[in-house]
Amino acid sequence: MQPDPLLCWRQEFPISERTSYLVSHSLGAMPLRARARVQRHLDQWDQRGVRAWAEGWWVAQNEIAAAVESILGAAADTVSMHQNVAVASQVILSCFEFSGLRRKIVLCDAEFPSVLYLYEGQRARGAEIVRVPSDEAGIGIDLDRLLKAIDERTLLVPISHVLFRSAFIQDARAIAARAREVGAFLILDVFQSVGTVPLQLAEWGVHAAVGGALKFLCGGPGNGFLYVDPHERARLRPTFTGWMAHDNPFGFEREHALRGDGWRFLHGTPNVPAIAAGTDGPAIVAEIGVEAIRRKSIRQTALIVDRARHHGYAVHAPSAPEQRGGTVAVKVPHGYEVCQALLAEDTVVDFRPEAGIRIAPHFYTEDAECTRVVDRMAEIVSSRAYERFSRQERSPG
């Protein structure tokens, strides 16, 4: 077998040497250089005080945004950084009203709950919500059914590129084409695909996209992002806004004159510590290239699928590699408790209801970790080692 060239990056992520870190779909590993950058941020705050705003803090988002743009397949100055996907979604959502005949929001019932809560809340503003159901197995969404739901009365189509439970990849190009055909506006959630599935948002015709550096981009919490097609930007006027979006913020003018670039969708004071922590992860992913990461991901998720089937476990993920993102969910008996047993042994995975134990290798993962985690699940089940975790209170981990 040929040596894995991407494993040269493993030493950049210290947690991979202390644990079997297989949870990048939830929180990517921290790069070594992030610690150094955060220390430089703290030193600057300590030594320069308020002058740090003019010496880099105010524009700190530009470096991480540029790396994200290159990974998204987007033009320069089209990405703005936000606290999380809910905030980024609210910014773009605030550009629209639900007062006319076109007031329908079409989304999938398999969306992440936070997204469902946000868009369901628009009923109070007059929106009509249409949820497209999953297939019988709960893994994917029928594309024809979804496209038919997007009609001339549809205003917004907030859709995940990769579903969080099953890692099912939706056809973003086809959905974007349908939205443009009927005059709807697509908001593509790329949180579970960015950094592990190649993206070409401009080429696909995506109007807007939300996501974050938290997962496969290894950028930590507090670094959500919003992409807006530059051809759509000028007509959009967010009402969830703030002084960073002003064309002359330090003029402290009473009337809001929105900027013409991606900063048009910013709002209040930026989260500089999060940006400092998050800048290097996306830069590393951009340097490696998502195509190379994708090839390794396909190979390693196949190892997990094959090993799960060897032990007789069902897999809550598409069988076809081209339809599967970077995560495989394995359904084992007593899944939550088995997950806790693995965590206690420093094999880091997570559990989700209706899916099972989710496993996500990344470019710093060794092949042996992909088979070993499934073998260990089988051992925990057969030995009933999970029983000592059965009474533990469930936590977000």
Image (cartoon, grey):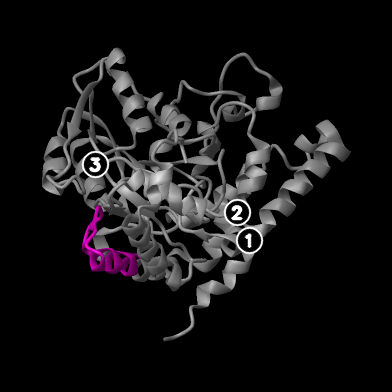
**Magenta-colored span:** 301-320
Which mark identifies residue 180? Answer: 3
How far apart marks 3 and 2 lie (CA) works out to 39 Å
Query: Which residue sits furthest bottom?
Result: 1
Q: Quadrant of the N terminus?
A: bottom left
Verify CB contact (< 8 Å) between mark 3 and mark 2: no
The kind of residue tagged 3 is: Arg
Residue hosting label 1: 14
How far apart marks 1 and 2 lie (CA) works out to 8 Å
Give residue 89's quadrant in the image.
top left
Question: Is 289 left, or right, of 150 in this rendering?
Answer: right
Q: Residues within 10 Å of mark 1 (few under 14, many from 20)?
A: few
Q: Looking at the image, is mark 1 or mark 2 nearer the viewer?
A: 1
The kind of residue tagged 1 is: Pro
Q: Any magenta on residue 308? A: yes
Verify CB contact (< 8 Å) between mark 1 and mark 2: yes
Picture residue at 68% right of the left edge, 39% below the top: 273
Residue 230: percent from left, percent from top: 43, 43
Marks 1 and 3, the one that precedes in the sequence = 1
Residue hosting label 2: 30
Picture residue at 63% right of the left edge, 43% below the top: 275
Above or below, 345 relative to 269: below
Q: Is residue 162 visible?
A: no
